Amino acid sequence: MTARLSAHHPPAHHLDDALLFDYATGALGEALALVVASHVALCEICRGTVAAAEAAGGALLAEIAPAVLAPDALERTLARLDAEEAAASPPPPGAAAEWRLPGPLVAYLGEDPAALDWQPLAAGVDAAALHPLAAPAWPMRTQVLLVRLAPGAMAPRHTHEGIEATVILQGGFADQFGQYERGDAWIVDASVTHAPVALPDETCLCLAYYDAPMKAVPLTPIVSSI
Ligand SMILES: [Zn+2]
């Protein structure tokens, strides 16, 4: 699995340890857990961190009275184990395999990812909303999108009311902070306005999580002084 899922180079942008720990302990909601699971499937370093957190958590759990655990703790842990099992199994044949998607994501795409409800966002940019498997709907205002950018296409310039968490699944893009390629993951908050541009050689596919709607930010018109 490692050889199949590894990028030609390891991811350079990782999720922070606190988020990985929350994932390992089953504390994340399904939407953010999907983003973390997708990065972890592509990143050996963060897989190691999650494994260490699980080992530490297991030791800790053994010392805590069961009454202290949240009522749904077992359910969340089992859901996470299912996701990890999926990470270890090969993707189904067809487009998902061509895209070499991380295992945890494949279940969210249905039989044919190309048949997802792709909606245009800008020239050369479209997005398809993913829906939860474990609940009828995401929490209010949460969105999970597959975003596809043609080579060199620019995403609409935007900021966020909440956070945006992104994992690059194929290709890559650049913004004012740097360049991101397959497996890279990062989180930006409401202080960031950016307009990522896909790298020139390949269609860029990424998984994006928003806990509040994206806000378009047009370029400020240049006002000439007299
Ligand atoms: Zn990582």
Image (cartoon, rainbow, N blue to C red):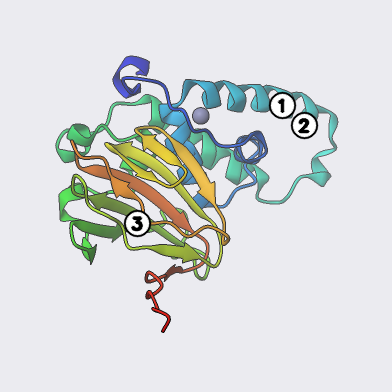
Whether the residues at callouts 1 and 2 have beta carbons within 8 Å, the answer is yes
Mark 1 lies on residue = 58
For residue 109, above or below residue 95: below
Q: Amino acid at mark 3?
A: Leu
Marks 3, 2: nearer the viewer: 3
Q: Is mark 1 within 8 Å of ligand 1?
A: no
For residue 43, above or below residue 162: above
Precedes in sequence: disc 3 or disc 1? 1
Q: Which residue is pictured at 41% across the width and 42% down the height? A: 167
Whether the residues at callouts 3 and 2 have beta carbons within 8 Å, the answer is no
Marks 3, 1: nearer the viewer: 3
Residue 61's tag is 2
SS label for mark 1: helix
Rounded to the nearest whole Å, what is the CA distance between mark 3 and mark 2?
33 Å
Q: Is mark 3 within 8 Å of ligand 1?
A: no
Rounded to the nearest whole Å, what is the CA distance between mark 3 and mark 1?
32 Å
Q: Which residue lies most toward the bottom here?
A: 226
Dot 3 alpha-carbon crowd within 10 angstroms: few under 14, some 14 to 19, many 20 or more: many
Mark 3 lies on residue = 130
- The quadrant holding residue 42 is top left
